[in-house]
Amino acid sequence: MINVSFPVGAFQCNCHILVCPLTGDGVIIDPGDEPHKIQQLLAEIESNLGKPISIQYLFHTHAHFDHIGATRSVKESILQNRGAGAAICLHRQDKRLYGFLRLQGAVLLRRYKKPLPVDHFYEDDEEFFVGRLKFSIRHTPGHTAGSVCLLLHENSEIQCPEILFSGDTLFYRGVGRTDLPGGSAETLIKSVRQRLFVLEDDTVVYPGHGGKTFIGYERRNNPFVS
């Protein structure tokens, strides 16, 4: 499996490009900023792989501006250069927040174009197959009403461990803010305990900001939910 993770923008949102090496199919998770950097990395991955890449989905863990700010630019570039793909995916309960992108940016004096329509709204426990990559959706409200975590299932055929992309729900020794509109501390803690801490100890966690961790470590050491 090809997994390129990198922070983007002033808020250092972790963006991820994942590609199945056998088929060239891939996804981008949380394209929050720096669309030119994302396109440059796509070109580098494609060159190293030696075959065209087909980005099937733009997955979003939630609809705060630092996670969706480059979605329009990235999708338009993919459509222009590759012709198809890049379906925008989001949970329906964050649809309104997604539509308020320009308002979110205005609070911090950032200017955005009107967001493109969402192509697909997640269902809880929905599965996506991208080449040999298998993702499942875990609705984890609390940071926002529509926050989700993306579970990438283990596949030894392509050297893929089990990975959780936790957005702003779970961090290394921390959890997401709940003092923003749509947030709820009680709901977030319930989401983490019932939807995330049931995973295996060695599940790798890539949060929306900061470094990676593991489910087992957080279950034992996270002061907010342990």
Image (spheres, rainbow, N blue to C red):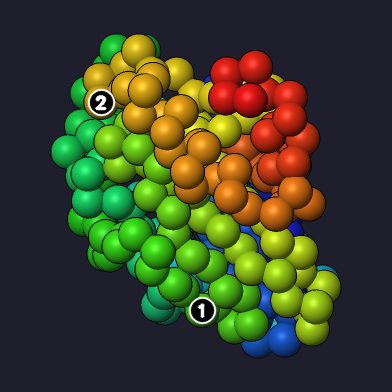
Q: What element carries label 2?
A: loop
Q: Distance between the residues labelled 1 and 2?
A: 30 Å
**Image: 117 above or below 167:** below
> Looking at the image, can residue 54 be seen?
no
The secondary structure type at the circle numbered 1 is strand
For disc 1, the neighbor class at 10 Å (few under 14, some 14 to 19, many from 20) is few
Residue at position x 47%, y 43% in the image: 194
Residue 84 lies in what quarter of the image? bottom left
Q: In this view, does 35 lie to the left or right of 161?
A: left
Quarter holding the N terminus?
Answer: bottom right
Q: What residue type is labelled 2?
A: Gly
Q: In this view, does 148 lie above or below 87?
A: above
Where in the figure is residue 207, as x and y percent of width and height?
A: 62, 37
User: How crowded is the residue under tag 2: few (<14 C-alpha within 10 Å), some, or many (20+)?
Assistant: some
- Residue at horizontal 71%, vertical 70%? 154
Residue situated in front as seen by the camera: 43 or 33: 33
Question: Looking at the picture, how far across and down is residue 91, in whole percent?
Answer: 30, 51
Q: Which residue is drawn at 64% across and 68% down?
A: 153
Residue at 49% x, 24% y is 176
Q: In which quarter of the image is the C terminus?
A: top right
- The mark that comes first in sequence, 1 or 2, is 1
Residue under label 1: 129
Amino acid identity at mark 1: Phe
Residue 191 percent coordinates (x, y)? 43, 38
Q: Residue 182, which numbered label? A: 2
Marks 2 and 1: in contact by CB < 8 Å? no
Q: In this view, does 135 lie above or below 190?
A: below
